[in-house]
Structure formats: C-alpha cells, structure tokens
Amino acid sequence: MRGRTLPIAAIAGALALALPAAAAQAPVVVIANSGRVAPPSCPTNPSAVISRTTAVQVKDGSNREPFEVRVAGELVSWSVTLAVPTSGQVHYFDRHEGGTARAQLAVLRSDGALRYKLVALGPLVRMQPYFGKSARLRLAHPIAVAKGEVVALSVPTWLPALAIDYPRTTSWRASRGASDCSNVTAETAQTTLGAAARYDCLYEKALVTYSASEAVSG
C-alpha cells in the first residue's frame, strides 16, 4: 500500500538538515502536553518505561486529546525528554524488551472506537545517546498531517519517557488489545502503514514526555 512513509536515510544526517524554506516560513504550532511536565521515571525502582508499543497521550488533566491535529500542516520536528536509567536497568530492558532504546514519530487516524490506522511514520531513532536530555529531532522530510489525525510515539523496544505520579485525570493509551494490557513484552508497536490496531489499554496517572512541532498550512 502506498502511504506517507519516509525514507530511512542516515539518521545523523537527517537530523542535522535545516528545515525546508517553505516550512521555516510557515507559522509553527507545538502539539504537546499542557501544564506541568514532570521528569520521566528512572532510575527509580521499579522504573516505568514505554515498552514495545505505540503510545499516545489522551488526557492531560482537563485537556482531552492534546495530540490531536487541530489544523492541517506538516510535522517538521519532534521532541522527547528522557530519563537516565542505571546501567543495570539499561541492560535489563535491552535484554527483555527487544533491544536498545529506539523510537519514531507516528501519525494515526481514527478507524472507529479505540481503533487507529497508521498513516505516517518517521525514521526510527536510537535513543540512548539522548538519555538525560530533552532532544529535539528535526525531520529531513516533513510529515503531512490532516485535521483530526493524532500524533503518537511508536516504541518497538523501550523508552524511558514516562513521567508518573500524576492525578488519574492524566492518562495515555497503548496499541494493545484489552487482554494484553499487562503484557509489556509482546511487540505491539504499529509499524505497517495502512494497518489498524486497537488502543484498548488505558494507563492512568502517567504522562508520555513527547511533543511535535507543526508548520501549519495557510
């Protein structure tokens, strides 16, 4: 199926490229959590991480659907704030969660109640060099987005980008079926363009520490 896929070029070069002139001149809005963003968990014990799934923040206090695209445009960069796991935690997660920490930006479109289709996917990035940092990753090829689509974070392995101890009014969903909410080692990250997945699993009191910048149209 043809889709809005991005060529997975050399990541270092892709992240270093400047924004295209047209995108740079367009008004830019940030799609992000509102209010206080606490430092992500780790090296607390136990350490909370995103593991082997596609994650989307669905509520941030009184703000519902903070990562829904409000106006058409192009995603030009994304950001993520990462914790600093201990060497023992890194070894454990690398061994049990499919390999080293990696993540990529994803764009979803509703395909019915709690079901989303993957319509775009950014390059897969090795994230360990960014532990302990708030990294802003520019997209060499901006991702077109339409009003109503949702910006998510796809994590095929694991990522220390989860802030905890929020009120129950803060929650995120994962691309897992209802019977798999506690199974965090099974691979459920969306990686096939055009394919749909259930987002039955709601995790409360936690915040995924990511954002995206959109150059809006018009």
Image (cartoon, grey):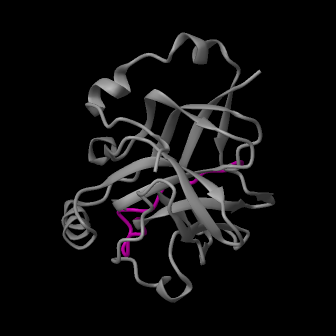
Residue found at x 34% / y 45% = 124
Q: Position of residue 3 (x, y in %)?
A: 50, 44
Q: Quadrant of the C terminus?
A: top right
Residue extending furthest right?
62
Horizontal side of 55 relative to 33 (left or right) equals left
Horizontal side of 217 relative to 143 (left or right) equals right
Residue found at x 45% / y 61% = 190
Magenta highlight on residue 39: yes
* Nearest to the observer: residue 33 or residue 183: 183
Q: Measured along the vertical axis of the image, is residue 123 above or below residue 204?
A: above
The total number of labels drawn is 0
Q: Position of residue 101 (x, y in %)?
A: 29, 55
Asked whether the viewer can see residue 160, the reply is no
What segment carries the magenta color? 34-51
Residue found at x 31% / y 59% = 85
Q: Position of residue 123 (x, y in %)?
A: 37, 41
State the image quarter where residue 11 is shown.
top left
* Nearest to the observer: residue 74 or residue 130: 74
Q: Position of residue 135 (x, y in %)?
A: 42, 37
* Nearest to the observer: residue 85 or residue 126: 126
Residue extending furthest front?
1
Q: Measured along the vertical axis of the image, is residue 146 above or below residue 181?
A: above
Magenta stretch: dominant SS?
Answer: loop
Asked whether the viewer can see residue 185, the reply is yes
Horizontal side of 94 relative to 49 (left or right) equals left
